[in-house]
Image (spheres, rainbow, N blue to C red):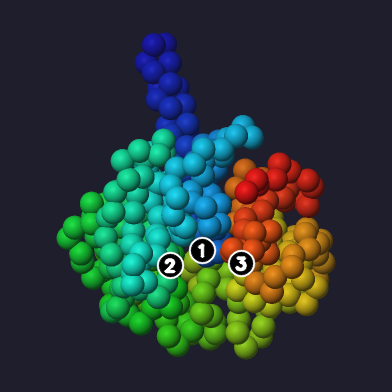
Protein backbone atom coordinates (compact mmCIF):
# COMPACT_ATOMS: atom_id res chain seq x y z
CA UNK A 1 0.00 0.00 0.00
CA UNK A 2 2.83 2.37 0.89
CA UNK A 3 4.58 1.53 -2.35
CA UNK A 4 1.44 2.40 -4.30
CA UNK A 5 1.20 5.77 -2.50
CA UNK A 6 4.82 6.51 -3.38
CA UNK A 7 4.13 5.77 -7.04
CA UNK A 8 1.08 8.07 -7.02
CA UNK A 9 3.10 10.87 -5.39
CA UNK A 10 5.96 10.49 -7.89
CA UNK A 11 3.53 10.51 -10.84
CA UNK A 12 1.77 13.58 -9.43
CA UNK A 13 5.06 15.45 -9.02
CA UNK A 14 6.01 14.49 -12.57
CA UNK A 15 2.74 15.86 -13.93
CA UNK A 16 3.23 19.12 -12.02
CA UNK A 17 6.79 19.52 -13.34
CA UNK A 18 5.69 18.83 -16.90
CA UNK A 19 2.94 21.42 -16.52
CA UNK A 20 5.42 23.97 -15.21
CA UNK A 21 7.77 23.32 -18.14
CA UNK A 22 4.92 23.66 -20.62
CA UNK A 23 3.73 26.89 -19.00
CA UNK A 24 7.26 28.33 -19.04
CA UNK A 25 7.68 27.34 -22.69
CA UNK A 26 4.35 28.87 -23.70
CA UNK A 27 5.16 32.12 -21.90
CA UNK A 28 8.51 32.38 -23.66
CA UNK A 29 6.88 31.69 -27.01
CA UNK A 30 4.29 34.41 -26.44
CA UNK A 31 7.08 36.88 -25.72
CA UNK A 32 8.37 36.31 -29.27
CA UNK A 33 5.67 38.65 -30.55
CA UNK A 34 7.07 41.40 -28.32
CA UNK A 35 10.63 40.72 -29.39
CA UNK A 36 9.53 41.03 -33.01
CA UNK A 37 8.12 44.46 -32.06
CA UNK A 38 11.47 45.78 -30.76
CA UNK A 39 11.05 44.12 -27.37
CA UNK A 40 9.79 47.22 -25.54
CA UNK A 41 7.85 45.21 -22.94
CA UNK A 42 8.19 41.89 -21.13
CA UNK A 43 6.55 40.21 -18.16
CA UNK A 44 7.96 38.05 -15.37
CA UNK A 45 5.51 36.66 -12.84
CA UNK A 46 3.15 39.57 -12.10
CA UNK A 47 5.64 42.35 -12.88
CA UNK A 48 5.76 44.09 -16.24
CA UNK A 49 9.05 45.63 -17.34
CA UNK A 50 8.75 48.19 -20.09
CA UNK A 51 10.61 50.92 -21.88
CA UNK A 52 8.87 54.18 -21.03
CA UNK A 53 9.93 55.56 -24.38
CA UNK A 54 12.42 57.33 -24.08
CA UNK A 55 12.68 57.58 -20.30
CA UNK A 56 14.24 54.23 -19.40
CA UNK A 57 13.13 50.82 -18.11
CA UNK A 58 10.35 50.77 -15.51
CA UNK A 59 8.98 47.92 -13.40
CA UNK A 60 5.17 48.02 -13.15
CA UNK A 61 3.15 46.02 -10.60
CA UNK A 62 -0.17 46.54 -8.83
CA UNK A 63 -0.61 49.94 -10.46
CA UNK A 64 2.76 51.25 -9.24
CA UNK A 65 5.98 51.69 -11.16
CA UNK A 66 9.66 51.89 -10.30
CA UNK A 67 12.37 53.32 -12.52
CA UNK A 68 15.29 50.92 -13.04
CA UNK A 69 17.39 52.63 -15.72
CA UNK A 70 17.40 55.92 -17.62
CA UNK A 71 18.32 54.39 -20.99
CA UNK A 72 16.10 53.76 -23.99
CA UNK A 73 16.07 49.97 -24.14
CA UNK A 74 15.13 47.38 -26.73
CA UNK A 75 14.84 43.57 -26.79
CA UNK A 76 14.03 43.55 -23.07
CA UNK A 77 13.96 40.08 -21.52
CA UNK A 78 14.15 38.63 -18.01
CA UNK A 79 16.35 35.66 -17.15
CA UNK A 80 17.05 34.47 -13.60
CA UNK A 81 16.02 37.74 -11.89
CA UNK A 82 18.06 39.85 -14.28
CA UNK A 83 16.88 42.11 -17.08
CA UNK A 84 18.84 41.92 -20.33
CA UNK A 85 18.44 44.60 -22.97
CA UNK A 86 20.01 46.43 -25.91
CA UNK A 87 20.73 50.12 -25.97
CA UNK A 88 22.47 52.46 -28.40
CA UNK A 89 25.69 53.96 -27.04
CA UNK A 90 28.16 56.49 -28.42
CA UNK A 91 28.97 56.29 -32.14
CA UNK A 92 25.71 54.33 -32.67
CA UNK A 93 27.18 51.14 -31.25
CA UNK A 94 24.73 48.48 -30.08
CA UNK A 95 25.42 47.40 -26.50
CA UNK A 96 23.96 44.48 -24.56
CA UNK A 97 23.50 45.24 -20.86
CA UNK A 98 21.86 43.68 -17.84
CA UNK A 99 20.56 44.87 -14.51
CA UNK A 100 18.95 43.13 -11.55
CA UNK A 101 15.17 43.31 -11.41
CA UNK A 102 15.49 45.56 -8.34
CA UNK A 103 17.51 48.11 -10.34
CA UNK A 104 20.94 47.22 -8.93
CA UNK A 105 24.20 45.91 -10.45
CA UNK A 106 24.04 47.44 -13.92
CA UNK A 107 26.59 45.71 -16.15
CA UNK A 108 27.71 46.23 -19.73
CA UNK A 109 28.07 42.79 -21.30
CA UNK A 110 29.23 43.40 -24.86
CA UNK A 111 29.26 45.73 -27.84
CA UNK A 112 27.90 43.99 -30.90
CA UNK A 113 27.70 44.96 -34.54
CA UNK A 114 24.33 44.07 -35.95
CA UNK A 115 21.45 45.54 -37.93
CA UNK A 116 18.92 43.46 -35.98
CA UNK A 117 17.93 44.69 -32.51
CA UNK A 118 17.10 41.35 -30.94
CA UNK A 119 18.84 38.63 -29.00
CA UNK A 120 17.93 35.59 -26.92
CA UNK A 121 19.24 34.68 -23.46
CA UNK A 122 19.69 31.06 -22.42
CA UNK A 123 21.64 29.33 -19.65
CA UNK A 124 24.59 28.66 -21.96
CA UNK A 125 24.80 32.17 -23.36
CA UNK A 126 23.36 35.02 -25.41
CA UNK A 127 22.52 34.48 -29.09
CA UNK A 128 22.53 37.44 -31.48
CA UNK A 129 23.03 38.31 -35.14
CA UNK A 130 26.66 38.97 -36.07
CA UNK A 131 28.16 39.95 -39.44
CA UNK A 132 28.45 36.37 -40.70
CA UNK A 133 25.47 34.74 -39.03
CA UNK A 134 24.19 33.86 -35.57
CA UNK A 135 26.76 34.13 -32.78
CA UNK A 136 26.83 33.29 -29.08
CA UNK A 137 28.69 34.74 -26.11
CA UNK A 138 28.44 33.71 -22.48
CA UNK A 139 26.33 35.84 -20.14
CA UNK A 140 29.38 37.80 -19.03
CA UNK A 141 30.21 38.81 -22.61
CA UNK A 142 33.11 36.43 -23.20
CA UNK A 143 33.86 33.56 -25.55
CA UNK A 144 32.19 34.67 -28.78
CA UNK A 145 31.40 31.74 -31.07
CA UNK A 146 29.83 31.72 -34.52
CA UNK A 147 27.04 29.15 -34.18
CA UNK A 148 25.53 29.28 -37.65
CA UNK A 149 27.03 30.94 -40.72
CA UNK A 150 24.29 32.21 -43.02
CA UNK A 151 23.00 35.49 -44.42
CA UNK A 152 20.25 36.00 -41.86
CA UNK A 153 17.45 38.59 -41.93
CA UNK A 154 15.56 37.46 -38.83
CA UNK A 155 15.68 34.66 -36.26
CA UNK A 156 14.03 33.30 -33.13
CA UNK A 157 15.02 30.58 -30.71
CA UNK A 158 12.43 28.11 -29.48
CA UNK A 159 13.62 25.25 -27.30
CA UNK A 160 16.67 23.69 -28.92
CA UNK A 161 15.97 25.08 -32.39
CA UNK A 162 16.71 28.30 -34.25
CA UNK A 163 14.17 29.44 -36.81
CA UNK A 164 15.36 32.02 -39.32
CA UNK A 165 14.72 33.86 -42.56
CA UNK A 166 17.57 34.26 -45.03
CA UNK A 167 18.34 36.87 -47.71
CA UNK A 168 16.31 34.85 -50.19
CA UNK A 169 13.22 35.35 -47.97
CA UNK A 170 13.09 31.64 -47.20
CA UNK A 171 12.27 30.27 -43.75
CA UNK A 172 14.63 27.67 -42.32
CA UNK A 173 15.47 25.84 -39.14
CA UNK A 174 18.74 24.72 -37.52
CA UNK A 175 19.63 23.15 -34.18
CA UNK A 176 20.83 25.37 -31.34
CA UNK A 177 24.33 23.98 -31.91
CA UNK A 178 24.25 25.03 -35.58
CA UNK A 179 23.81 21.51 -36.92
CA UNK A 180 21.32 20.04 -39.41
CA UNK A 181 20.09 23.21 -41.12
CA UNK A 182 17.31 22.90 -43.67
CA UNK A 183 14.77 25.09 -45.41
CA UNK A 184 11.17 24.73 -44.25
CA UNK A 185 9.57 26.92 -46.91
CA UNK A 186 11.44 27.99 -50.06
CA UNK A 187 8.62 30.22 -51.31
CA UNK A 188 7.66 32.04 -48.12
CA UNK A 189 8.70 35.50 -49.38
CA UNK A 190 9.28 36.38 -45.73
CA UNK A 191 11.70 38.91 -44.28
CA UNK A 192 10.59 38.43 -40.66
CA UNK A 193 8.54 35.95 -38.66
CA UNK A 194 7.08 35.13 -35.27
CA UNK A 195 7.12 31.65 -33.75
CA UNK A 196 4.20 31.43 -31.32
CA UNK A 197 2.28 28.46 -29.85
CA UNK A 198 3.68 25.88 -32.27
CA UNK A 199 3.10 27.99 -35.39
CA UNK A 200 5.43 30.05 -37.58
CA UNK A 201 3.71 33.29 -38.65
CA UNK A 202 5.04 35.43 -41.48
CA UNK A 203 3.97 38.21 -43.81
CA UNK A 204 4.23 37.05 -47.40
CA UNK A 205 5.69 40.08 -49.20
CA UNK A 206 4.22 39.05 -52.57
CA UNK A 207 0.74 38.10 -51.34
CA UNK A 208 0.69 41.02 -48.86
CA UNK A 209 -1.08 38.80 -46.33
CA UNK A 210 -0.31 36.89 -43.13
CA UNK A 211 0.33 33.15 -43.35
CA UNK A 212 1.43 30.44 -40.93
CA UNK A 213 2.63 26.85 -40.93
CA UNK A 214 3.87 24.27 -38.44
CA UNK A 215 7.53 24.13 -37.32
CA UNK A 216 7.98 21.03 -39.49
CA UNK A 217 7.09 23.09 -42.58
CA UNK A 218 3.64 21.54 -43.05
CA UNK A 219 0.01 22.70 -42.78
CA UNK A 220 0.49 26.10 -44.39
CA UNK A 221 -2.61 28.28 -44.19
CA UNK A 222 -3.78 31.85 -44.70
CA UNK A 223 -4.26 33.69 -41.41
CA UNK A 224 -5.48 37.08 -42.62
CA UNK A 225 -5.65 39.37 -45.63
CA UNK A 226 -6.07 42.31 -43.25
CA UNK A 227 -2.48 42.24 -41.97
CA UNK A 228 -0.47 44.09 -44.61
CA UNK A 229 2.75 45.06 -42.79
CA UNK A 230 5.28 43.72 -40.30
CA UNK A 231 3.73 45.47 -37.30
CA UNK A 232 1.68 42.69 -35.78
CA UNK A 233 1.77 40.62 -32.59
CA UNK A 234 0.28 37.15 -32.22
CA UNK A 235 -1.05 36.53 -28.71
CA UNK A 236 -3.58 33.91 -27.62
CA UNK A 237 -6.34 33.50 -30.18
CA UNK A 238 -5.80 36.93 -31.75
CA UNK A 239 -3.49 38.82 -34.07
CA UNK A 240 -3.02 42.46 -33.05
CA UNK A 241 -1.87 44.58 -35.96
CA UNK A 242 -1.36 48.08 -37.33
CA UNK A 243 -4.06 49.13 -39.79
CA UNK A 244 -2.32 51.98 -41.60
CA UNK A 245 -5.26 52.75 -43.88
CA UNK A 246 -7.55 53.53 -40.93
CA UNK A 247 -4.81 54.78 -38.53
CA UNK A 248 -5.74 52.22 -35.89
CA UNK A 249 -4.41 49.25 -34.01
CA UNK A 250 -6.89 46.44 -34.56
CA UNK A 251 -7.25 42.79 -33.74
CA UNK A 252 -8.63 39.80 -35.59
CA UNK A 253 -9.49 36.40 -34.17
CA UNK A 254 -7.47 33.59 -35.73
CA UNK A 255 -9.81 31.62 -37.97
CA UNK A 256 -11.81 34.76 -38.84
CA UNK A 257 -9.48 36.17 -41.50
CA UNK A 258 -11.80 38.96 -42.71
CA UNK A 259 -13.22 40.17 -39.39
CA UNK A 260 -11.57 42.67 -37.07
CA UNK A 261 -12.18 44.97 -34.11
CA UNK A 262 -10.58 48.38 -33.77
CA UNK A 263 -8.78 48.82 -30.44
CA UNK A 264 -7.34 52.34 -30.55
CA UNK A 265 -6.81 55.19 -33.00
CA UNK A 266 -3.24 56.46 -33.33
CA UNK A 267 -1.76 59.69 -34.69
CA UNK A 268 1.46 58.30 -36.20
CA UNK A 269 2.03 56.23 -39.34
CA UNK A 270 4.12 53.60 -37.56
CA UNK A 271 4.10 52.00 -34.12
CA UNK A 272 5.18 48.90 -32.21
CA UNK A 273 2.75 46.52 -30.50
CA UNK A 274 3.79 44.83 -27.25
CA UNK A 275 1.52 42.80 -24.95
CA UNK A 276 1.84 41.97 -21.23
CA UNK A 277 -0.57 41.32 -18.35
CA UNK A 278 -3.63 41.53 -20.65
CA UNK A 279 -2.67 45.03 -21.75
CA UNK A 280 -1.44 46.34 -25.07
CA UNK A 281 1.52 48.73 -25.06
CA UNK A 282 2.06 50.87 -28.15
CA UNK A 283 3.95 53.92 -29.40
CA UNK A 284 2.10 57.05 -30.47
CA UNK A 285 2.79 60.73 -30.91
CA UNK A 286 4.42 62.25 -27.85
CA UNK A 287 2.78 65.04 -25.88
CA UNK A 288 6.27 66.32 -25.19
CA UNK A 289 7.68 68.34 -28.10
CA UNK A 290 11.21 67.20 -27.25
CA UNK A 291 10.54 63.67 -28.52
CA UNK A 292 8.61 62.03 -31.35
CA UNK A 293 7.07 59.02 -29.60
CA UNK A 294 5.94 58.00 -26.16
CA UNK A 295 4.50 54.80 -24.72
CA UNK A 296 0.77 54.24 -24.11
CA UNK A 297 -1.22 51.25 -22.89
CA UNK A 298 -4.77 50.03 -23.21
CA UNK A 299 -6.76 46.85 -22.49
CA UNK A 300 -6.65 44.13 -25.13
CA UNK A 301 -10.29 44.80 -26.03
CA UNK A 302 -9.77 48.56 -26.16
CA UNK A 303 -11.05 49.18 -22.65
CA UNK A 304 -9.59 51.98 -20.55
CA UNK A 305 -6.67 51.09 -18.31
CA UNK A 306 -4.31 53.04 -16.07
CA UNK A 307 -2.49 55.52 -18.28
CA UNK A 308 1.29 55.87 -18.40
CA UNK A 309 2.28 59.14 -16.78
CA UNK A 310 5.13 61.14 -18.29
Q: Tell me where residue 194 appears, x and y as whole percent.
A: 54, 66
Q: Is residue 243 above or below residue 198?
A: below
Residue at position x 28%, y 54% in the image = 108
Q: Tell me where residue 192 appears, x and y as whole percent.
A: 51, 74
Q: Is residue 13 above or below residue 123?
A: above
Residue at position x 27%, y 55% in the image = 109
Residue 290 can be seen in this image: yes
* SS at mark 1 in the image: loop
- Left or right position of 257 against 2: right
Dot in front, 3 or 2: 3
- Left or right position of 308 against 170: right
Name the one closer to the observer, 106 or 235. Answer: 106
The residue under label 3 is 292
The residue under label 1 is 38
Q: Tell me where residue 144 appears, x and y as whole percent.
A: 20, 64
* SS at mark 3 in the image: loop
* SS at mark 2 in the image: loop
The residue under label 2 is 117
> Alpha-carbon distance for marks 3 and 1?
17 Å
Amino acid sequence: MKKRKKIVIIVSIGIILIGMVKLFTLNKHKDNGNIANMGLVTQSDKTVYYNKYEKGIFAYKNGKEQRLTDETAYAISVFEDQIYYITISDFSNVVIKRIDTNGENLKKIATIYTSLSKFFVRSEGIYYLANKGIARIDRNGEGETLVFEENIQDFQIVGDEIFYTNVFNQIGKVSISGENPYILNEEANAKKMQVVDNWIYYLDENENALFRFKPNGKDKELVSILVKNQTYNVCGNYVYYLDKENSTIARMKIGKSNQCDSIVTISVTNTKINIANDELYYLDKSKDESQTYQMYRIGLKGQETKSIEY
